[in-house]
Amino acid sequence: MKTIDLALLGFGNVGKAFARLLTAKKQELQEQFGFNSRITAIATGSHGVCLDPNGIDEQNLLNLLASKDPLDLSVLDKMAFHGDMFDFIQQAPAHVLVETTPVNPRSGLPALDYLRAAAKRGLHLITANKGPVVYGFRELTELTKEHGRLFRFESTVMDGAPIFSLFRGPLAGAKLHGFYGILNSCTNLLLDRMRGGETLEQAIAYGASIGITETDPSNDVDGWDAAIKVAVLSNVLMGQNLTPMDVKPIGIRRITPEMISTAESQGKRWKLVCQGGWQDGHYQVSVKPEMVGPSSPLYTVDGTSSYVNFALDVLPGLGILETDPSPKTTAFGLLADLIDIVKSETR
Ligand SMILES: NC(=O)c1ccc[n+]([C@@H]2O[C@H](COP(=O)([O-])OP(=O)(O)OC[C@H]3O[C@@H](n4cnc5c(N)ncnc54)[C@H](OP(=O)(O)O)[C@@H]3O)[C@@H](O)[C@H]2O)c1
């Protein structure tokens, strides 16, 4: 049976969920897809690095994750590793780099440089990080192609929901005219809480208490997370070359309790609506709060759910709804990419 060795660069919420999912799905991967996967290298910013050419012992890794002690991966290192992230990328005994470091919406760095280095080394690339996709989609696609490898990033938009694989596969013969939807689940939850009577500040405090909003929520509240997703969809699916700054997002800070009440009295709801597509010969994008009525598919997209609707020449309105997102659903996007890569090697 084929063995695929994986190097994980970044081991936070998503990286850990991916390691757990690989263990949970081990037998299915062997029986249904005929391959065995091993994690042979893990790197973090401040929780150590470990490499083991025979595969990091799964049980030891799970025990380390279950432990109450601060994570120190260096106890699992079998290669006496010394060096920086670029040394890690060169030395990791792996076929695939799975990158899950934090997003940098202004440049995609340093993740973009990590992925460039891994592609030049001839590794397949999987990332959950929107930064390198928005700033390096074409370059990384070309670099991996030169080595007969693939660049995959399914979980960058709507976590594990299939978007990019749909356009490579079942929708390959369709022409995309545009899309709209709710792509930031955090602001959708905040607007729901405000509908329940909270101020934005109270809703943010609630979001922080359940781990949905960050200490600095501006990435979500000011629309930047939504803008980078609009740029990713535009660049990958519609041939554009946008940055999040080109989207000029308008977030939800100006939404007041009075505006929420006014919408309610008209039978409508405020949503942070994302759009991209061709209008009168021009490519237009926007991220802005809009009042939507019950006839819109966005009206019932509640809580942390997200939704995208694609307008295609042959399918005028194709909608995808994702409910209950979590690092586990994101990890599934990484796994789907891995299966796609393994299948590509046997096609
Ligand atoms: N959370 C989700 O459900 C979700 C959904 C979709 C997409 N994503 C994307 O997935 C990525 C990971 O998210 P996450 O929630 O797992 O983040 P996280 O919990 O903050 O984990 C990030 C990991 O990257 C490491 N790291 C940080 N800076 C680094 C650097 N310069 N070089 C090498 N490693 C570095 C961190 O090291 P330490 O361990 O030392 O901190 C940590 O292990 C992000 O790009 C995010 O936007 C996340």
Image: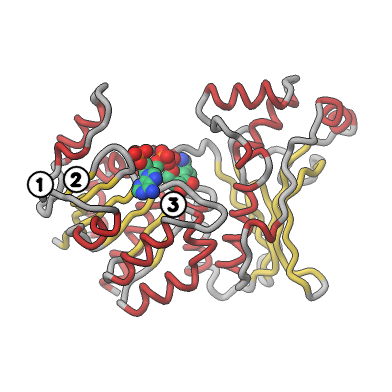
Res 50 label: 2
Residue that label 1 marks: 78
Figure quadrant of residue 318:
bottom right
Q: Amino acid at mark 3?
A: Ala
Mark 3 or mark 2: which comes first in sequence? 2
Nearer the camera: disc 3 or disc 1:
1
Which numbered disc, 3 or 1, marks the residue that appears first in the sequence? Answer: 1
Residue that mark 3 sits on: 128
Q: Is residue 312 left or right of residue 157?
A: right
Residue at (89% x, 30% y) in the render? 262
Q: Is 308 placed left or right of 130 in the picture?
A: right
Q: Are marks 1 and 2 in contact (CB under 8 Å)?
A: yes
Mark 3 Cα shell of 10 Å, populated few (<14), some (14-19), many (≥20):
many
Seen as rendered, the residue at the extreme front is: 83
Q: For the residue with label 2, is its CB less than 8 Å from the closest atom of ligand 1? A: no
Against 183, is 62 above or below?
A: above
Give the residue type that dot 1 points to. Lys
